[in-house]
Image (cartoon, grey):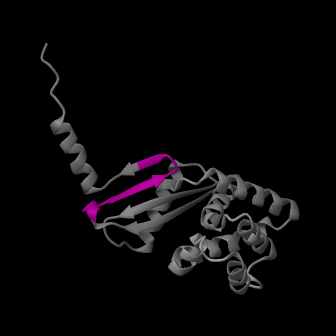
Amino acid sequence: MEILSKPASRYAQAFADWAHRQGVLDVIREEVDQLLRLIENTPDLRRFLGNHLIPQAMRQTTLVTLFEGRVHPALLRLIYFVEFKKRLGLLPQILRSFQQKDEHLRGVVRGRVVFAQPVDPAVERQVESWVAMRIPVKELRLESRVDAALIGGLTIRVADLFWDGSVAGGLHRIRRRMESPLPAKG
């Protein structure tokens, strides 16, 4: 999980509190997710958000062009406010922090499953069921990835729990045992 800055966390908390008071928290939740995915998948947008050399008037015009009429007014207000405070580069962190705070309040826990090779969706559902039986949460959201470096098997990380059922992990554990000193004979 990414470490988020304190300012991003404070902006996210203030935005979440404000959105809750306005009664729009449920409405903007999906839009925050979509905007964050857009930022993560659009390198030019990420560069624009982090580029403080662009004159403020041009940045504001670009924001109007990109977002006005396309996002909920509450989210647009956040974007404009962050730009006004000259913190637009923090927007992705603010949105991620907002997601984390919102999910925590709703009892949502995220995790990651890494498979050594692509698997059927049925296998992914089985793994998710296995994890859900061991972690009592309201909602579990697992992200799946493939990493051939595992050689075989899988790893699972949910919150502060980690299960390593990979061949690479098993080989690493064997190596550590073999390198550790033998107990002294008494």
Task: Report whether 181 appears left or right of 80.
Answer: left
- Image location of residue 151, percent across then percent down: 24, 62
Q: Measuring 63% from the left and 75% from the top, which residue is drawn there?
A: 34
Q: Residue furthest left?
A: 185
Q: Position of residue 180 (x, y in %)?
A: 19, 33
Q: Is residue 118 above or below residue 184?
A: below
- Camera-nearest residue between 148 and 85: 85
Q: Please tell me which residue is depicted at 76% across the width and 59% down the height of the picture.
A: 16
Q: Residue at x 45, y 63 (%)?
A: 126
* Residue at image coords 76%, 60%: 15
Q: Quadrant of the C terminus?
A: top left
Q: Tell how many labels.
A: 0
* Residue 157 counted in the magenta span: yes
Q: Toward the viewer: 31 or 59?
A: 59
Of 67 and 83, the residue lying toward us = 83
Task: Decide: is 52 above or below 61.
Answer: above
Extreme residue toward the right, this view: 22
State which region is magenta. 149-162
